[in-house]
Image: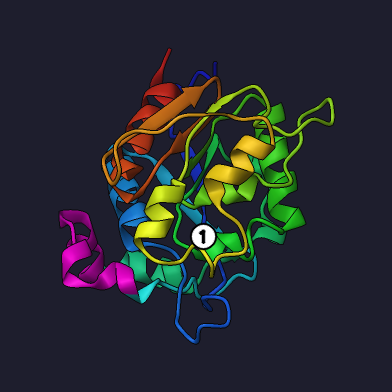
Amino acid sequence: MLIKTGVINILFVLTSHSQMGDTGHKTGFWIEEFANPYYALADAGVKITIATPKGGVAPIDPTSNLPQNVTEDTERFSKDEAVQKMINETIALADINFEDYDAVFYPGGHGPLWDLAEDKTSAKLIQDFYAANKPVAFVCHAPAALKHVKDANGEFLVKGKKVTGFTNEEEEAVQLTNVVPFLVEDMLKEHGGIYSRGKTWEAYAVQDGNLITGQNPASSALVAEILLKMLQKD
């Protein structure tokens, strides 16, 4: 287990992808899945750096900004010019050195299904963090980024590990089953993950060693809580 006595540095990785397939609709990262963990960690004194595959602006899924999806933390984000500036000026993944950080966290949204799932730099980054015994955390659609990640033995990282992620039932509920390139639940199972889930739209997260996964937007704060406890353990 990682032992921290000084400032904790966590890398947040967001999507650069803004198009929902060929539907003409916009996507990106889900605000709640970024804002809730961001403030939970930042308020605890964690230093956070934000990166994306392309660098620059990380696109926000407009649906995540609708009134029914607003939380206390998303409202805080909407008034936080400093954090919004970070979102608009993210670092390119290619310029990130995993040795500078104690853990990596991937917020979701549908965007990662298109870019982070296939991004070789992202996959290598996750592999490096995990090989260095550093926590890797994902929520909702973000476990898509594990699609091509292998362990030191060349096996899929999720093989034989307890995992969760956005359920097929939840994808069907938002009517995007036939739009997304693949279903997170199916991919995790096909790669040998020991998949489990909680109730639809309710908070549920799973930890297996240094791998942390959360099921849906409501699980974001829980993933951050588990991650923080891991990093503060002495």
Around disc 1, counting alpha carbons within 10 Å, would you say few (fewer than 14), some (14 to 19), or many (20 or more)?
A: many
- The magenta region covers 63-79
Expressed as whole percent of the image width and height from the top left, the position of residue 223 reads: 38, 36
Q: In this view, does 58 lie above or below 214?
A: below
Count of numbered marks: 1
Q: In this view, does 26 lie to the left or right of 134?
A: left
Residue 117 at least partly seen: yes
Is 14 rendered above or below residue 213? below
At a point 53% along the width and 78% down the height, the residue shown is: 19
Give percent across and percent down for residue 43: 26, 43
Vertical placement of residue 74 versus 20, above or below:
above
For the C terminus, the image quarter is top left
- 177, 25: nearer the viewer: 177
Q: Is residue 71 magenta?
A: yes
Q: Main secondary structure of the magenta part?
A: helix
Nearest the camera: 179 or 94?
Answer: 179
Q: Which residue is drawn at 39% across and 32% down?
A: 205
Q: Is residue 73 left or right of residue 162?
A: left
Instruction: Kindly state the secondary structure of the residue where label 1 is placed.
Output: loop
In the figure, residue 197 lies in which quadrant?
top left
Q: Can residue 81 be seen in this view?
A: no
In the picture provided, is 126 more to the left or to the right than 38? right
Percent position of residue 175, x then y:
40, 66
Residue type indicated by callout 1? Leu
Name the residue at 41% across, 58% down.
172
Furthest toward the top, the residue is 234
Q: Is residue 198 above or below residue 60?
A: above
Q: In which quarter of the image is the N terminus?
A: top right
In magenta segment, residue 182: no
| Residue pointed to by mark 1 | 14
